[in-house]
Image: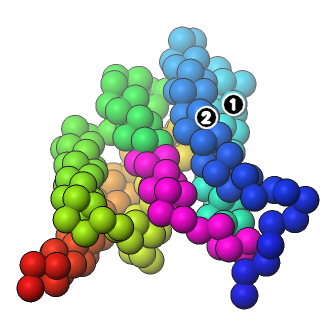
C-alpha cells in the first residue's frame, strides 16, 4: 500500500527527474574536460563519474519514491523515460567522437541501433497516444535491464575500461535493446489491434 508523501515532499520525484535531465550537460562538460589534457585529467574523469553516479541515483530514487508515495502518473512515467533516453543518446553521441585514448569510441552501428530504437518507440507512442488517448509508458523488466546495461556501458567508457570488455558489452546491450524494443512493439501492436477490433 502506498504511503502519503511526508512533509509536503510530493514534488520530489518529479524534481529528481528534471534534475537528471539538467545533469546531462554537466556530464558532457566534465567528459569534454577529460579530453583537453594529454591522457586525461583524473579530476575531470572523477567529476564525470560523480555526475554519472548522481544521474543513476536520481533514476532509482524518483521511481521508487513515486511508487512508495502513490504519485505514479503518466506524465511522471513519460518524463522519466524521456530523461533515460536523453541521457543515453547524449552520452553515446559524445563518445562517437574520436576521444581516444581517453575514451573508447562508440561504434556508429551501435549508436544507429539505439537511435533507431528510440525513434521507433517514440513513433509508436505518438500513434497510440493519438488513437487510444492514454498509453501505458511504464518500464517493463526488459526495459529496465536494457537501461541498466546502457548505464553500465557509459560508466565503463567514462572510467576508461579496456576495449575487450566494452566490445562484449556493446554486443550484449545491442541484443537486449533489440529484444526489448521488439517486445514493446508487439505490445503496442496488440493495443492498436484491440482498439481497431
The residue segment tinted magenta is 67-85
The structure residue drawn at horizontal position 49% and vertical position 51%, both measured from the top left corner, is: 79
* Rendered location of residue 104, percent (x, y): 40, 35
Residue 176 can be seen, yes or no: no
Q: Nearer the viewer, residue 118 or 151?
A: 118
Residue 29 can be seen, yes or no: yes
Q: Nearer the viewer, residue 27 or 84?
A: 84
Determine the CA span between mark 1 and mark 2: 12 Å
Left or right of 124 on screen, residue 176 = right
Instruction: State the residue position of label 1.
Output: 47
Vertically, is 88 above or below 61? above
Q: For the residue carrying disc 2, how many other residues have a C-alpha within 10 Å: few (<14), some (14-19), or many (20+)?
A: some
Quadrant of the image occupied by residue 65:
bottom right
Instruction: State the residue position of label 2.
Output: 23
Q: For the residue carrying disc 1, how many other residues have a C-alpha within 10 Å: few (<14), some (14-19), or many (20+)?
A: some
Q: Report helix, strand or loop for mark 2.
A: helix
Quadrant of the image occupied by residue 173:
bottom left
Left or right of 157 on screen, residue 97 = left
The structure residue drawn at horizontal position 75% and vertical position 58%, both measured from the top left corner, is: 10
Amino acid at each position: 500500500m502506498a504511503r502519503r508523501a511526508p512533509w509536503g515532499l510530493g514534488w520530489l520525484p518529479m524534481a529528481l527527474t528534471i534534475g537528471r535531465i539538467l545533469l546531462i550537460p554537466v556530464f558532457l562538460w566534465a567528459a569534454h574536460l577529460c579530453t583537453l589534457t594529454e591522457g586525461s585529467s583524473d579530476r575531470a574523469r572523477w567529476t564525470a563519474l560523480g555526475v554519472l553516479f548522481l544521474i543513476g541515483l536520481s533514476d532509482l530514487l524518483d521511481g521508487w519514491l513515486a511508487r512508495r508515495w502513490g504519485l505514479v502518473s503518466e506524465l511522471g512515467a513519460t518524463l522519466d523515460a524521456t530523461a533515460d533516453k536523453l541521457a543515453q543518446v547524449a552520452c553515446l553521441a559524445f563518445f562517437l567522437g574520436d576521444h581516444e585514448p581517453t575514451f573508447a569510441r562508440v561504434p556508429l552501428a551501435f549508436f544507429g541501433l539505439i537511435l533507431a530504437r528510440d525513434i521507433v518507440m517514440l513513433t509508436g507512442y505518438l500513434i497510440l497516444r493519438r488513437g487510444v488517448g492514454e498509453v501505458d509508458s511504464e518500464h517493463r523488466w526488459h526495459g529496465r535491464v536494457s537501461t541498466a546495461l546502457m548505464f553500465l556501458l557509459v560508466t565503463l567508457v567514462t572510467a576508461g575500461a579496456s576495449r575487450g570488455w566494452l566490445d562484449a558489452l556493446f554486443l550484449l546491450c545491442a541484443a537486449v535493446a533489440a529484444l526489448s524494443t521488439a517486445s514493446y512493439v508487439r505490445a503496442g501492436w496488440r493495443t492498436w489491434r484491440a482498439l481497431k477490433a
